[in-house]
Amino acid sequence: MSRQKNGKELEKIAQLIRYNILTMTTEAGSGHPTSSLSAVELMVGLLFGGIFRYDPEYPERPNNDRLLFSKGHASPLFYSLWAAAGKVSPEDLLTYRRFGSPLEGHPTVNFPYAEAATGSLGQGLSIGVGMALNAKLDKLTYRTYVLLGDSEMAEGSVWEAMEIAAHYRLDNLLAVLDVNRLGQRGETMYGHNLEAYRRRAEAFGWQALTIDGHNLAEVVDAYCQADQAIGRPTMIIARTLKGKGVSFIEDKNGWHGKVLKREELDLALAELGEVDKEVRGTFAAPQDLQPSQKAEAETATLSYGLGEMVATRKAYGNALKRLYPAFPQMVCLDGEVSNSTMAEYFKEEHADRFFEMYIAEQNMAGAALGLACRGKIPFVSTFAAFMSRAYDQVRMSQYSDANIKFVGSHAGVSIGMDGPSQMGLEDIAFFRTIHDGLVFYPCDAVSTEKLVAKAARHCGLVYLRTTRMATPVIYEAKEEFPIGGCKVLRQSDADQATLVAAGLTVHEALAACESLGKEGIAVRVIDLYCIKPVDRKTLQKAAAASKLLITVEDHYPEGGLGEAVRSALWDAKVTVASLAVHRKPKSGKPDELLDYEDISARAIADKVRELIG
Amino acid sequence: MSRQKNGKELEKIAQLIRYNILTMTTEAGSGHPTSSLSAVELMVGLLFGGIFRYDPEYPERPNNDRLLFSKGHASPLFYSLWAAAGKVSPEDLLTYRRFGSPLEGHPTVNFPYAEAATGSLGQGLSIGVGMALNAKLDKLTYRTYVLLGDSEMAEGSVWEAMEIAAHYRLDNLLAVLDVNRLGQRGETMYGHNLEAYRRRAEAFGWQALTIDGHNLAEVVDAYCQADQAIGRPTMIIARTLKGKGVSFIEDKNGWHGKVLKREELDLALAELGEVDKEVRGTFAAPQDLQPSQKAEAETATLSYGLGEMVATRKAYGNALKRLYPAFPQMVCLDGEVSNSTMAEYFKEEHADRFFEMYIAEQNMAGAALGLACRGKIPFVSTFAAFMSRAYDQVRMSQYSDANIKFVGSHAGVSIGMDGPSQMGLEDIAFFRTIHDGLVFYPCDAVSTEKLVAKAARHCGLVYLRTTRMATPVIYEAKEEFPIGGCKVLRQSDADQATLVAAGLTVHEALAACESLGKEGIAVRVIDLYCIKPVDRKTLQKAAAASKLLITVEDHYPEGGLGEAVRSALWDAKVTVASLAVHRKPKSGKPDELLDYEDISARAIADKVRELIG
C-alpha cells in the first residue's frame, strides 16, 4: 500500500512553503531561510504525503504522531508547514519574530503545534527518544519524527540519543537528517558524504536510508520503508541543498542566517514562478487509542523514628516507591548510578517505569523532557556534580514549560574520599537560575519524603538535592513542608544571631547552637529546606530579631543558599555572613572536609563568637 | 623492531601492582579496586613494555609521552604504576584517599604525574585530543595515551572527541578501551561485545584493534601496531575482567567501588601468591625535542574613537588578533560560530593556531584543557548560552588549575529576535562558582580589548561575556582596567542612589542617569566590568554615600551581578535592589526586550524614583 499523495499536489504545497519562507523572513528582517529551504520536500512529503497521522483539531490527542524540529532555526519552514495545514493564517506568518508573536525565532511552546522548544542544537533527538519511550510504555502506535541538521550531528548528545534509541529498540522513532552540507560558517565535517553518516548510524544500530532529499517520491518511499522497521529506529539521510530553489543562494556558503533583501526577494519569487496560495495539505488520521490510566491510590504513611540515621538519598528512593500509587504518571530515569542515588528502590518495584539511561546525562535530560511533554512526571537522578553535564538541556526545558524533577545526590564536600570531581558544589547556583524553578534541599528523611511529594504534585521544574551520608531524622512524620517555607528549629527572645542552613549543615548548625548555648550565647536556627522560592517573611522576622544572620552551606559561596538569603533580605539592612566551601576541596573524611571548609559546628560557633564579639 | 620487554619481568610488575591496588584500597576503606585490576596488563604493557617514552626526572619535558586516566576511579592502578616506576613509596601508597595526601580518590594535579584531574567520566579523550593537537602544532613526536572505561563510552563527549580526532588526523593519539563489561550498577549496554565498539570506532574514522587485555604479549604488540598508524588515531579495544586476579570478585557484579575487608584481602593476597616487592619498571627515553618558541613582541595600539559604535564581540576578535604577538602561546578554539563570536578575526591571521571544533562544546572545552596543560593559552568561544553544554568540563578544569579563557558571546535578551534558546542568561551564575575564576563583562570596545589582555596575562580560568549589538565606545584608549576593579562613570556629592551595571546595561544606566539628572535627581553610575573578584571597596564607598544601590543586568536575577554586589556588601547594611531578566524572555527587538524585562533606561529611572520616593 502506497500512502503517497498526488505528487503534483505535494509540489504545489512545497512551492507555497518556499514562497512563505522567503517572504516571512524578509519581512522579519532576520531568520534562516536557507536552512529552511533545504528541508521543504522532506517535511512536505512527511506531513502531507499520507505518512503523518495527526488530528489538527486536537493536538493533544494521545496517539497523534509527533514532529520535532531539532534544527530549530528552520522555524520558517516549521510555521509554513502549519500554514499549509491551514492552522496559521498568511497574516500571522508575517508576524514572525515580532515581539508578542507566538512565531518566535526558534520554536517555543507559545506556538501550539510545537511539541517542545528547540534551538540549542543536538537536543531534539533526545526529546524524541522520550516520546518514543512513552509510546512503548503506554502501548500507543504513534510515531515520533525528528528533523536533524547535519551540523548538529557533531553534538555528542545526538550520539547518546542514537545509542539509547537502538538499545531500547525504538522502531517508532524516525530521524530525518537534512544533509545540506553547510554549517553556519562553512562546510560541515563530512559535507555531502552521506556514507559517512550512514556508516555511523548503522554502527550505532540504526536502519539508515540515503535519499535525494528534494525528490518527493523518494522521500515518501523512504518514510514508507522506515515505517516497516521492526526492532530498530530509522534514520533517513537526505542529500539536500541549502537555499534550494533560489539559484543565487543555493548551495552557497555565506548565506546561513541571512535573509533576502527586498530586491533579492523579488528575484527569488520570480524564479519560484506561480504559487498557488490556496493549496492546503491534510494529514492522515491517527488510530484512536488512549493510554491506559491507572487510578490514583493512597500512599503508605511514613515510619521513620526521630533520631534514626537515614541518608536523604535513601529517603528519596523510598519516597519514589511509596508515592507512585498517588502519582501513576511517575517515571524514573537514572544515569547508571541508581544504586547511589537510590532510584533503584523504585526500579525494584516498577521496572517498566524505570529507564536506565547509562552514563549519558544530556540524553537523559532530553528524554525526560520528551516524557514530560507526553504527560509523564519524570524523576531524573544522578550525582549533583554530573547534573552539570545536562545544564543546557535543563536550561532549554524551562522554555518548554517542562514538568521534570531533577534529583542530584552526593552533594557537597561531605561525600568525602572520592574527591572534588564527584562533589556537586555549583548545582544550587545553576538550578536557582531556572525561571519559576523550585530548589529543595532537605536535611532529613521525613522532609525529603514530603518534598518529593511536593515535587510530584507541583507542575514545573524542580531540583532536589540529596546527601550521601546518613543524617538523623529530626521531624515527626506529620510535619508539613510547604513550598516557599522554612522551619525555625531553635529560637528565643535572646537570640544574638540566626543560623540559616539546609541539608547537611542543618545538623552542624544545631550542634553549634547547642555548644554556644552552654556558653550563654543564644542563636536561632533555621532549616531553609526550600531555597527557591525563599521564605522572605520568616527570614525578615529573624533579621528583625537578631540583626545578624549567618548562612551555612555545603556548596560554593556564589549563587547558593547564602546569596538566596541576601537577595531575600535586599532591603532589610542586616548583616548576612556566609560560611560556604571556600577552599579548593580534596579527598578526606566528611568531618575533616566540613571542618577544612569552615562549615562544621566548630566553624559556625567560631563565626558567631567573632561576629557578636 | 620489537620494543617488548622481558615478559616475565612485566608479569612480576603486574603482580606487584595488583598487590598494591588491593592493599591500598583496603587500607583506605574505599576506592575502586575491581576497576583497577581489569586494566593492569594494559597499563603495565604500555608503561614498562618499552612503549611509553618518558623522563620521570622531568615530567614537564615537552616531548614526554602523555598518559591520561579518563576512568579516573582506577586511581589505585594509576598510583601503583608510579610506585612501580619508583616514584611513589610503598608508605605513601597507603596514604591513598587520606586528607592531605596527593593520592586523592580520583587523580588531581596535586599528584605530580597526573596530567589533569579526571573522575567525571567521558572527559579524558577530549583532553587527549588537546594534547595531541598541541604535539602537531609544536612539531613534537610525543604520543598521548588515554585509558577509557567501557561505561563512559556512553557519554556523547567521547564521540565528540572521536570525530574530531579523526577529522584532525591525530595519529599521535591512542585510546585504550578497558572493556570489563560491568558498570557501576550492572552490565554496560554492550557487555563483552568488542565488535560493537570496533564498528563504532571504525565508523568514526579510527583504526581499531581488538585484543585480550590480560595477555601482555598481545597488549604490547597492539601498541607497536598502533604506533605505526598514519593519518588516523587508534583505539585498542581490550576484553578484560573486572576484578581480574581475585577469583571471588573477578567478573562479578556488585563489586564496583567496593574494597575488600581485611579477611577478604588475606584470601586475595594468598591467591596472588608470591610478590616481588622490589621489582621496578623503566620507561623508554623520549626524543629530546623542544617546541619552537616565538619571542614576545609589541602589540599595536588601540584606535577606537569615543562614541564609535562597536560590538564587544568584534572588539574581542580584534583583541585576539592584536594581542597574539605579545602572547605567542595563544591558541583559539570555536564551536562553529566564529563568524558570530568574531574569533574568525584571529583565524584569518593565524589559521594554524585556530581550531574549528564544530558544534561540540564539551569536546572543545576538554581539548582546551589539554592544550592548556601543555602550556598554551586557549581562548574558547561560543554563544554564552551554549557554554552551558560544557559546564561539567569547565567545572572539572578548575581541579586541573587550568589556564583557559572562555568567551561567551550573544549574552542576554538583547540578542533580540532569535529568542530565548540563544540567550545566555545563567552564564555569570555558573562561572562565578569557579574557585579562583575571574568573570569579566565589558561594556565597550576599549574595555573589552584591555580585559582580553588581562585574561591572557592572568594564569587561571577566566570568563569573558560579550554582547551581540554594537555599543558606543566610552573609554579612552589609555584607560586601564585592573582585575578586581570597576569604573565610577558618574558621581556627585548629591547622589541619591548608585546604579551598578555591566556590559550592555552600563549604557542604559548612563541614559537613566541623564534623564534623572534633568529632573534634579543625581545618581552615581558604576561600570562593574569585573564581576569576580568584585571591587568591594568602591562599592562600599558608594554605599556609604548613597545608602541605596540598584544593580542592572541582562541576566537572570540569581547568581549574577546583583548577588555579587550583595555579597560584597554583606555587612554594609544597605539596600541593594536588583533589576534583572525577571520574565520568561521571547523574540523581539532588543529595545523591546530590555524594556519588557525592566532593565532599560526607562525601567531604571522608574526604579530610582520608586525607591527614593
Image (cartoon, coloured by chain):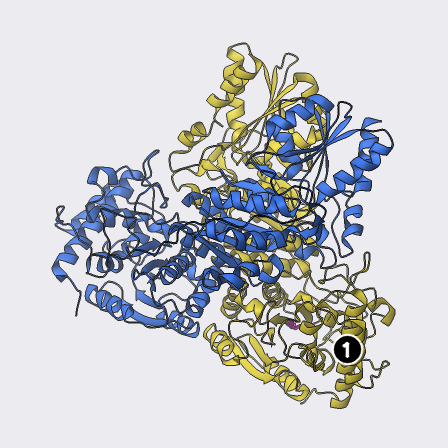
Chain colours: A yellow, B blue
Whether residue A298 is visible, yes or no, is no
Name the residue carrying label 1.
A17
Q: Secondary structure at mark 1?
A: helix
Q: Magenta residues, as a range? A: A141-145
| Quarter of the figure with residue B553 | top right
Answer with left or right where residue B427 lies relative to residue B72.
Answer: right
| Quarter of the figure with residue A475 | top right
Q: Position of residue B494 (x, y in %)?
A: 78, 23
As drawn, A115 above or below A500: below
Residue name at image x 81 percent, y 36 percent: B514
Q: Chain of mark 1?
A: A
Answer with left or right where residue A238 lies relative to residue B131.
Answer: right
Q: Position of residue B39 (x, y in %)?
A: 28, 57
Which residue occupies the extreme top position in the image? A520
Nearest the viewer among A502 and A158 is A158
Split into 4 quadrants, where in the image is the N terminus of chain A? bottom right
Report if residue B445 lies within the magenta region. Answer: no
